[in-house]
Every structure is written in C-alpha cells, then in structure tokens.
Amino acid sequence: MRTVGLLLLSILFPAFVHAADPPSLTTYTISHDTIYPTATVESGLATTTVIDTAFSEAVKVSIKITSESGALIKSLYSSSSVTNPTPKIWNGTNTAGAVVDNGTYTILIFATSTATDLSMIDSSKIITVASSDPTPSDDSSGTTDTTADTTTDTITTPPSSGGGPTEYLPIPTLRIITSGNRTVSSGADVAFTASVYDGKGNKRDDAVVTWSFGDGMRRVGASVFHPYYDPGEYVAVTHVTTSDGGDALAESIIIVKNAGIKIASISARGIDLTNNDSRTLDLSLWRLSMGGQEFKIPENTKILAGHTVLFPSRVIELPTANEASLLYPSGEVATTYPATSNIVQASVAVQPAASVVSYQRVQAVEPIISTRTNVQVHEEAVIAPSAVFSTETAEGAALPPTLSVGAPTSGVGTVSSLFKSPWTLGFIGTVILASGAFILL
C-alpha cells in the first residue's frame, strides 16, 4: 500500500501544482519612454505618456509609478476586477500634483487573478523624465521649427503649493474615421462605427463617442446600431471627447430609401431574392426565416441592382416550407413569400365554363332528333349561367317544344297504320281460314 500511495502521489502532485497559471499581460505598451513635463506646446516634445495594458483573465490590479529607490510616486489605477482597462496617462507628476525631479521611474503592475488568487508583478517598463528650456539661449547655433501635430491648445494650471513650475497640459487634435456618407434601407438596423486617433497616430480607445442621427435619436458608443424608419436625408453627427481635453465633430449624410427587395421564389434548391432597386443593396446581418428556423446573412453580403441571387439550401440549411420571410437585423419583417395566393389562383383556373358543358351535352343527344329539327334553336334554349347540368336536363332541353306535321306522336298511331296494309289483312284472313278448317275436321 505504501508503494501504491507513493506512486499515486508522484502522478497527481505535479497535476495539482500545474493546475493553473498566474495571469499574464497580453498587451503592454507605453506611447513615450521619455517625457518633458515642463515643455511648451511649441517645442513639440511629449509631456505625457499613455500606458495601455490588457490581461489574460479578470484580475485585481494596481498600476503605480515608483522611483529608482522603490518609493511610491503616484498610484495611477486600481480595480477589483478588470481584463482590459482603459489606457492610463502619466504627466510626470506625483500624488500631490507636483512635477517630479528628472530621472528614471518604474511602472509597477501588480495583478491577482480573481479566479485562482495567483499573482504576477511586472516592472519592466521605465519612463525617463527630463526637462526642456522652452526659451532657447541667444548663443544657440540654430533652431528647428517643429510643429506639434498632436495639440491645438493648452490648459495652464496654477503652480503647485510646493513652488513647482507652471504645468502645461496639451489638448490633442483628434481625427475621427467613420463610414462617411451612404445610402441605407428604411427599417433596417444600420451599423455606425467610429475610430478615434490623435495627431501622432495613436488610437484613442478611451474616447467617448456620441452619435446624433438627425431623427431625434442619440446613442453613445464607438460601435452602435440605429434604424431609420422613414425615407429621406439625415445628417448624422459624431461627437468625440477625451479625458485630456480632446474634442472633435464629424458629419455624415445618410440617405434613407425603401428596400426594393422581394423573395422571388422558394424551392428545394433554396430561396431566390430579387433586388428591384436601382442601387446595390447591402443585406449584412439580415435574416432569412423558413420552417420555424432562421439563417443570419453574413456581413458585407450585397445584391446588385436588378439582379436575383439564390441562397442555396445547402448553405442556409433551412427546412423547405410553403412560406418564407426576409427580416431586418432588428427582427422586423422586410418581405414575405405567401404560398396561399398560388393555391387560390389554381382553384379559380380549373372552374369550367357553362357554355362549353351545355354545348357538349346537346351534341351528345343530337342524333335522336329528327332531321327537321333546328339544332341552333335548341342550343340557345339550353345555354344557362349554371355550370352544372344533369343528363336528363340536357336531353330534355334538346327535344323540340312542338313536333312537326306528320311526325309520330305515340305507339297507337303506329299500330293503326299497320292494320291498314293489305298484306297484313290477307295474312290475318289466311290464319282465320286455317283455324276454322282445323276445327271442323
């Protein structure tokens, strides 16, 4: 038993030891490793640095700036649970707001997993703080005319109580990239996205993006959806702000038109969609519904104007049914394919005409009519609006209302004419004589 226990321990112990890994940094960048907190706007020197981090899992984290001796200079950020915090800016000041002395400073990141309580520490990034004289000396050999492409204005803060110099905080110039002017379909959810960059090309994910769509609706977010319900032209305004004073606007003209699309047919092969509009129609994230199931159309799926496109059954994998619907991304119905209309048309198409039936019935009994009968007169008599005729009715209708002169009216007339024939009377007389002779003999 002791041997078995040692064997199990040797197998299981490493598994427990390596069951979980500590959290790690998946993103860790700083925009500038050297900053000049006292530099002027005209100098073009970086006065701040942006620290961007992301972790492999949710962590309890703190980001601090420490001196070469390990003393705490400033606590930039702390959170009890975060995976991808917004980038943090350090402007070279301490906790009291005073500019620190020139030298090197360490970014200390301490993170603990909220799931396993395993921790990690990173102190690999160093920031150098240097000073810059905003007024060049007279004996300088020359100057470089450098225009800062990241600032348009500055915010001046009063000197700190410690007697430090006046602090200049640059206001960045922001560049907004949107989808621009475009034409969309009424009733459909339209994706609006904005990317924000500063003058140095750094992406500003910390920017607050506010959309005003021109129809009374407002939304906040770098990526949002919005439907326009009525055709027309709208001005969509994108307003962007940042925590360091950045502010910018961008406008887009949105032309809204009714979606001229229909379901042309459904079959075992799939669903045919026809674009009757004069423009290319974007069906990104629209949905096809049939047989109680739905298929989401992928992004950037477009149909040319005046064209029909088959969405094959092998792709959409929807059960074949008699009805189908095309839905906007919001779930509202854009167009349907009703199979019931075809059934009604089919039932109407097989309804027989009344005149055809009556004519066929008259012709079927025509041979029994006397040659002197006027057939056309009887056709006019029997044509009626009803499409249902019995055999007796048709035959009766084919008989003339009065008989022509000389025509036999009954079987009695036929018998009387028979007894007027001399041959018949002679035959009867012979039979009577023969019967009398037989009796007498």
Image: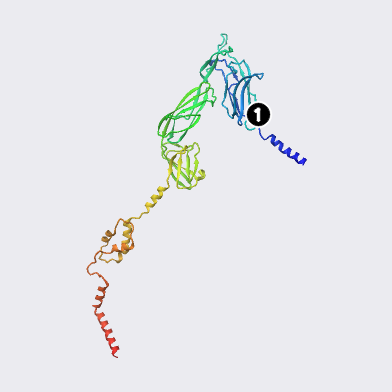
Where 88 falls versus 309 (above or below)? above
From the top left corner, tell me how far across and down residue 147 is, in percent: 52, 17
Packing grade of label 1 (10 A; few <14, some 14-19, many >=20) is some
Q: Residue at image x 42%, y 46%?
A: 338
Comparing 54 with 96, the one in front is: 96
Comparing 150 with 242, the one in front is: 242
Query: Residue placed farthest to the bottom in the image?
Result: 441
Query: Residue placed farthest to the right in the image?
Result: 2
Q: Quadrant of the C terminus?
A: bottom left
Q: Residue at image x 72%, y 38%?
A: 11
Q: Quadrant of the N terminus?
A: top right
Q: Residue at image x 30%, y 66%?
A: 368
Left or right, residue 165 beside residue 325 = right
Identify the amino acid type marked 1.
Answer: Ser
From the top left corner, tell me how far across and down residue 126 is, in percent: 63, 21
Q: Quadrant of residue 31?
A: top right
Q: Residue at image x 50%, y 41%?
A: 295
Where 21 falls versus 126 (above or below)? below
Determine if residue 64 is in view: yes
Query: Residue placed farthest to the top in the image?
Result: 138
From the top left corner, tell me how far across and down residue 357 is, in percent: 33, 58
Left or right, residue 339 beside residue 41 = left
From the top left corner, tell me how far across and down residue 330 is, in percent: 47, 37
Q: Secondary structure at mark 1?
A: strand
- Residue that mark 1 sits on: 119
